[in-house]
Amino acid sequence: MKLVKRALAFILALALMLPLAGCGQIVGRYRIVETLGEQSYAIGFRNDDYVRYYVEAALQVLEADGTINGLANSWFIEDSTYYASSIDALDQFPGIPQRTLLVGCDPDAYPLSYIENGQYAGYDVELARAVCSRLGWTAQFISVKSENAYDELMSGNVDCVWGGMTLDPDERDFTVLTPYLTDELVIITRADTGAKTLRGLKGASLAVSVEQKYMDLLQADEKLMNRFGEIKRLTGGLQALLDAVNSGQASAALVSSTAISRFGG
């Protein structure tokens, strides 16, 4: 039931935002033909778990000393992230206990969190490591999807969900910190040979990730859903979606604007 509520909340949040007409913006090898809505990334913790306060304070210090800005500029075209800032935030915690922080992150959320050569990488992964370094902790990363955040937290499998997590900021069953990044879900085609507008995709194939939330988003707009002749649900994250478009296996793909802005060049 909780999983259903979270899926519905995700769909409603996106459906409330009117789809914007695709302007044909070209990003590297790809063309954005439609913007479907926004999604926000955040960090989640069990309610009343004190680990949240340590992590939050460390983030404030890293924002104040420029570490977060440096990481953001290395991963994104520009730093659009938001964190509170306080260089003295950790002073209230003398003698922080040693521990391993179990971090649940999405392995398919490039460039926030993903797996490369068998290792976790990405902006969120590097920032989590920086936080743990500041606290004297060790970070251990565990694959988690946003829709499973509650179950993974409550089971104790992870201490926090952080890494490409699209979480509801009004969540009550666990604590969600203020979203640190917002981007858009966009439909892209190849810039050289693909359709230039959504109208040009009538009867075409669309590649999407296997997570149910993306199918739910499409199915919430019957007119949009009916435009495509085939929906191809692919594993492998962003790379698989772009490979499908590049090879002609799919005419278009549904991706995040953060991912395509970095990967498209």
Image (tube, rainbow, N blue to C red):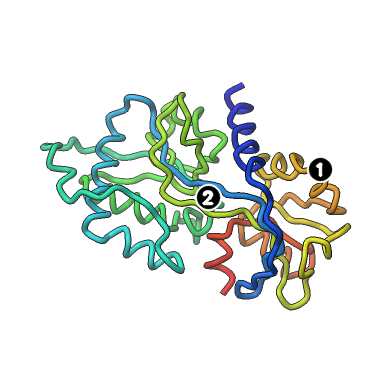
Considering the image in quadrants, where does the C terminus appear? bottom right
Front residue of this view, candidates 104 and 229: 229
The crowding category of the residue bearing disc 1, from other C-alpha atoms within 10 Å (few below 14, some 14 to 19, many at least 20), is: few
Task: Say what secondary structure mark 1 lies in.
Answer: helix
**Residue holding disc 1:** 222
Measure how far apart labels 1 and 2 are at the Cα level.
30 Å
From the viewer's perspective, is 29 left or right of 263?
A: right
Q: In the picture shown, does residue 260 fall above or below 212?
A: below
Q: In the picture shown, does residue 5 fall above or below 142?
A: above
**Residue holding disc 2:** 107
Lower position in the chain sequence, tag 1 or tag 2: 2
The structure residue drawn at horizontal position 35% and vertical position 62%, both measured from the top left corner, is 71
Front residue of this view, candidates 168 and 149: 168
What is the quadrant of residue 100 in the picture?
A: top left
> Where does residue 58 sit, x and y in percent of width and height?
24, 46
Task: Say what secondary structure mark 2 lies in.
Answer: loop
Amino acid at dot 1? Glu
